[in-house]
Image: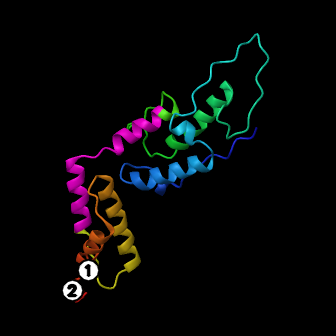
Amino acid sequence: MSMPSLFLLPTTDKFDGSNWIEWKTTIVNAAKAKGLMGYLKGKIKKPLPPNPSKPAPATSYWGSVSPTFEEWEQHDTYAQGMITLNIINPIRQGVRMDRTLAECWHSLCDTHDAQTDLGLIAAKEMLTSIKYTEGTDMEKHIAEMHEAWSKANNQGTAITDHKFCTYLLRSMPVLWSIL
């Protein structure tokens, strides 16, 4: 059984406390690609240690949903490394590294997915504060608006596509008001 290569992001893409949505999406996609979602969600339960008086169970392939005890520990540890090694300061970000991958992941999600009234207000204000400056990169501006929109919706604002278009139009310079 071969183990996939370690998934390490460049330092600029690692979770630093401000890029939760983007980082979480990347980690979830990597976990899916490496067959680790069952570990991430806690659906693949840790088997009992092998009985030393019985023959060792046959090993399974990497993506098996019923791994041996040793395989489960290897996969869980690998996936936990995939998360913790891609965080700038795991302890400061509230990662529970002394537990299973699922508990580690849930500790992060509980902290960073939390919707609050203040978070909702801040996310909406961020979206309304972004303004396009004439002569700058329009694609970059739209990407910044999309990112702020995603963050606002993750806080519970439920901004529809149509409503987002009004935010986008309001972000344009006054000279564009004929739109």
Q: Secondary structure at mark 2?
A: loop
Q: Main secondary structure of the magenta part?
A: helix
The residue under label 2 is which amino acid type? Ser
User: With respect to residue 122, does 176 lie above or below?
Assistant: below
| Residue 98: % across, % down | 48, 27
Give the number of the mark in front: 1 or 2: 2
How many residues crowd mark 2 within 10 Å: few (<14), some (14–19), many (20+)?
A: few
Place of residue 77 in the rendered image (x, y in percent of width and height, measured from the top left): 59, 33
| Magenta part of the chain | 103-128
Q: Element type at marker 1?
A: loop
- What is the C-alpha distance between the residues marked 1 and 2? 8 Å
| Residue at (56% x, 38% y) in the render | 38
Q: Residue placed at 42% from the left, 42% from the top?
A: 89
For residue 35, side relative to residue 24 (left or right): right
Q: Is residue 169 visible?
A: yes
Front residue of this view, candidates 108 and 62: 62
Sequence order check: which comes first, mark 1 or mark 2?
1
Q: Position of residue 40 (x, y in %)?
A: 52, 39
Question: Residue 81 got which mark?
Answer: none
Magenta stretch: includes residue 115: yes
- Image quadrant assignment for residue 111: top left
| Quadrant of the rendered image containing residue 78 | top right
The image's mark for residue 177 is 2
User: Where does residue 75 sit, x and y in percent of width and height?
Assistant: 63, 35
Evaluate if marks 1 and 2 touch, with contact meaning CB atoms under 8 Å apart. Answer: yes
Residue at image mark 1: 172
Of residues 168 and 80, which is closer to you in this image? 168
Counting other residues with Cα less than 10 Å from the Cα at mark 1, is it few (<14), some (14-19), or many (20 or more)?
some
Residue found at x 56% / y 36%: 39
Whether residue 8 can be seen here:
no
